[in-house]
């Protein structure tokens, strides 16, 4: 059953169950999806900071980016569970013979990359949503400043949570070229997200 097609109550029940999925990766995607949704809400409010055309144009541009980003983050909630289940299945493969061991090793490495791809994409999407946050903070209605602040906090949390999942799976991947490239992207995304979040928070503080 799809996590995102059920109720919020059902989703929380799934998170609290003894099953390993959904886990932290899905939770990270959920946090960022809510953050992107909140930014979209503020950007779409009838009232802007000054009521100017410049406000409305900046917010309209943010909505276009945030809507697609939120949809992709929402899809990642289920995608992370599927990816992790594949890792579990790979580790359960037979390893009685040398051939079985080889097949199992290949399957594990392939599954681990899948389990990295999803949270890495969540990091990319979270960073993209945060890139829109300074414009929403600067041009959105001041009465919704707390909503923007919550959105930024959730997106930062989602990105950090996704990074934790990338890092733990990356440690088990044997391809040094791949791990180096992913680690570099993780650092770049973290830096870009931090810069955008701080810019949004500065705009909120400026009033």
Image (cartoon, grey):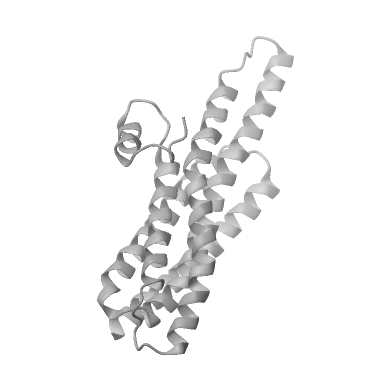
Viewer-proximal residue among 177 and 50:
50
Instruction: Residue at the far front: name it.
Output: 46
Residue 199 in the image, given as x and y percentages of width and height: 41, 78
Q: How many marks overall? A: 0
| Quarter location, residue 5 | top left
In percent of the image, x 48 and y 69: which residue is there? 63
Residue 78 in sight in this render = yes
Residue 183 in the image, given as x and y percentages of width and height: 58, 54
In percent of the image, x 53 and y 67: which residue is there? 65
Asked if 206 appears above or below 41 in the picture, the reply is below
Residue 84 in the image, given as x and y percentages of width and height: 52, 33
In percent of the image, x 51 and y 46: which residue is there? 76
Q: Along the horizontal axis of the image, is 119 left or right of 104?
A: left
Asked if 87 appears above or below 169 in the picture, the reply is above
Viewer-proximal residue among 43 and 168:
43
Q: Along the horizontal axis of the image, is 98 left or right of 164?
A: right
Asked if 32 appears above or below 23 in the picture, the reply is below
Q: Along the horizontal axis of the image, is 168 left or right of 199?
A: right
Residue 191 in sight in this render = no
Quadrant of the rendering where the C terminus is positioned:
bottom left
Q: Along the horizontal axis of the image, is 151 left or right of 168?
A: left
Viewer-proximal residue among 155 and 13:
13
């Amino acid at each position: 059953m799809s996590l995102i097609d059920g109720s919020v109550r059902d989703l929380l029940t799934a998170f609290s169950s003894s099953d390993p999925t959904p886990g932290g990766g899905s939770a990270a995607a959920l946090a960022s999806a809510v953050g992107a949704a909140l930014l979209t809400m503020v950007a779409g409010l009838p009232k802007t900071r000054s009521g100017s055309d410049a406000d409305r144009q900046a917010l309209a541009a943010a909505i276009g980016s945030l809507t697609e980003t939120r949809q992709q983050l929402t899809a990642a909630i289920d995608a992370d569970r599927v990816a992790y289940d594949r890792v579990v299945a790979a580790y359960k493969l037979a390893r009685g013979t040398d051939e079985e061991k080889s097949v199992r090793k290949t399957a594990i490495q392939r599954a681990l990359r899948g389990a990295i791809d999803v949270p890495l994409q969540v990091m990319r999407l979270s960073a993209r949503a945060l890139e829109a946050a300074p414009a929403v903070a600067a041009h959105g209605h001041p009465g919704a400043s707390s909503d923007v602040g919550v959105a930024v906090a959730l997106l930062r949390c989602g990105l950090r949570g996704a990074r934790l999942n990338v890092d733990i799976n990356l440690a088990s991947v044997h391809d040094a070229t791949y791990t180096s490239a992913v680690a570099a992207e993780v650092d770049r995304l973290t830096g870009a997200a931090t810069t955008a979040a701080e810019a949004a928070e500065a705009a909120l503080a400026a009033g």
